[in-house]
């Protein structure tokens, strides 16, 4: 009886252990600044890729090797890019995952910049950018990559404020921070077709180097939420103030430079409802505010 029980415990422990060891497949976590344009032709040690069936394909492609119906898939920069699709002849739906690990312990003011394009990829809930702060055990989707809303083979830039993403989704900068690029579809790039292309990925720190820490700046943003206009009143900013308003997925909505007033307004009447990030900055100060458009 005792022996049986022990065996049962060992079995349970080994099952738990083996299921845990399937997670956390990243063995290297890059420090920042980190960047890759895939020009070495292989994924560096910070990456891990997986597909939920053998039809999934995640590989680095050459810009000139994919031509279909008069279109050529080209790198954003230089020759090579990372592609997620399904092997020819397709037909089976696959979830492709490309992870990369970052050591962001004690970091702040971190941004993720990346270029993405797609080829006739349908929009599914699984398509997007996901983040884990626990080595890939749990992921949160932070950006939709909805292929149907974008022009095929046109590169789009995302510049994502990870501090804002963290505060929005309750994530933290840890030593096992994972960014997952995920694509779900059932055909291959040229001829089918479906697929995601990625290039020029960077994770970088925007800590200003010569900030005067004793001067605190702030801006009053009102009304917030708003359905029309927001007013911005500046406190302790210098001259030549700039602002940049982005959607939560990093698309620039509005920007203005060298404002020499201590208050100004931004018209949001024609913008869709949702959360926006307003960065207000001058030479020595920079602060980002959440703006809620109703
Ligand atoms: Ca490249
Ligand atoms: Ca898709
Ligand atoms: Ca498209
Ligand atoms: Ca499809």
Image (tube, rainbow, N blue to C red):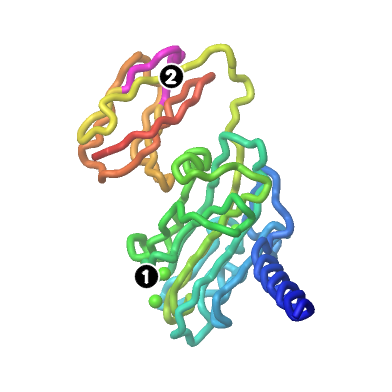
Q: Position of residue 265 (x, y in %)?
A: 27, 24
Query: Would you say the residues marked 1 and 2 are in contact, meaning their CB atoms lie under 8 Å apart?
Result: no
Q: Residues within 10 Å of mark 1 (few under 14, many from 20)?
A: many
Q: Residue at x 41, y 57 (%)?
A: 144
- Quarter of the image with the N terminus in it: bottom right
* 151 over 104 or under it: above or below: below
Q: Position of residue 24 (x, y in %)?
A: 67, 61
Q: Residue at x 65, y 49 (%)?
A: 102
* Chain part drawn in magenta: 232-242
> Which residue is at the front of the view, 161 or 209?
161
Q: Residue at x 33, y 24 (%)?
A: 221
Task: State how far apart marks 1 and 2 are (Cα).
Answer: 42 Å
- Quarter of the image with the C terminus in it: top left
Residue 104 figure quarter:
top right
* Residue 122: image tag: 1
Q: Which residue is mark 2?
A: 218
Residue labelled 1 has its Cβ within 8 Å of some atom of ligand 4: yes
Q: Is residue 33 visible?
A: no
Q: Residue placed farthest to the front in the image?
A: 1
Residue 105 figure quarter:
top right
Task: Give the SS element for disc 2.
Answer: strand
């Amino acid at each position: 009886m005792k022996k049986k029980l022990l065996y049962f415990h060992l079995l349970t422990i080994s099952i738990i252990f083996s299921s845990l060891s399937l997670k956390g497949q990243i063995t290297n976590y890059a420090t920042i600044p980190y960047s890759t344009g895939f020009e070495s032709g292989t994924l560096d040690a910070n990456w891990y890729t997986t597909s939920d069936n053998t039809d999934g394909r995640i590989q680095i492609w050459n810009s000139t090797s994919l031509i279909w119906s008069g279109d050529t898939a080209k790198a954003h920069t230089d020759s090579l890019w990372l592609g997620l699709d399904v092997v020819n002849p397709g037909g089976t739906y696959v979830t492709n995952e490309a992870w990369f690990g970052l050591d962001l312990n004690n970091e702040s003011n971190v941004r993720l910049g990346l270029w993405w394009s797609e080829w006739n990829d349908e929009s599914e809930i699984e398509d997007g950018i996901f983040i884990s702060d626990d080595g890939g055990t749990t992921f949160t989707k932070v950006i939709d990559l909805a292929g149907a809303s974008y022009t095929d083979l046109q590169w789009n830039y995302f510049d994502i404020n990870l501090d804002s993403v963290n505060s929005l989704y309750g994530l933290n900068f840890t030593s096992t921070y994972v960014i997952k690029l995920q694509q779900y579809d059932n055909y291959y790039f040229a001829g089918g077709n479906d697929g995601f292309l990625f290039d020029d990925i960077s994770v970088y720190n925007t800590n200003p180097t010569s900030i005067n820490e004793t001067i605190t700046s702030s801006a009053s943003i009102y009304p917030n939420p708003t359905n029309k206009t927001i007013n911005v009143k500046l406190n302790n900013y210098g001259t030549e103030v700039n602002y940049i308003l982005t959607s939560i997925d990093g698309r620039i909505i509005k920007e203005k430079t060298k404002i020499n007033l201590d208050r100004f307004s931004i018209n949001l009447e024609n913008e869709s409802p949702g959360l926006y990030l307003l960065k207000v900055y001058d030479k020595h100060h920079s602060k980002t505010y959440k703006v809620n458009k109703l």
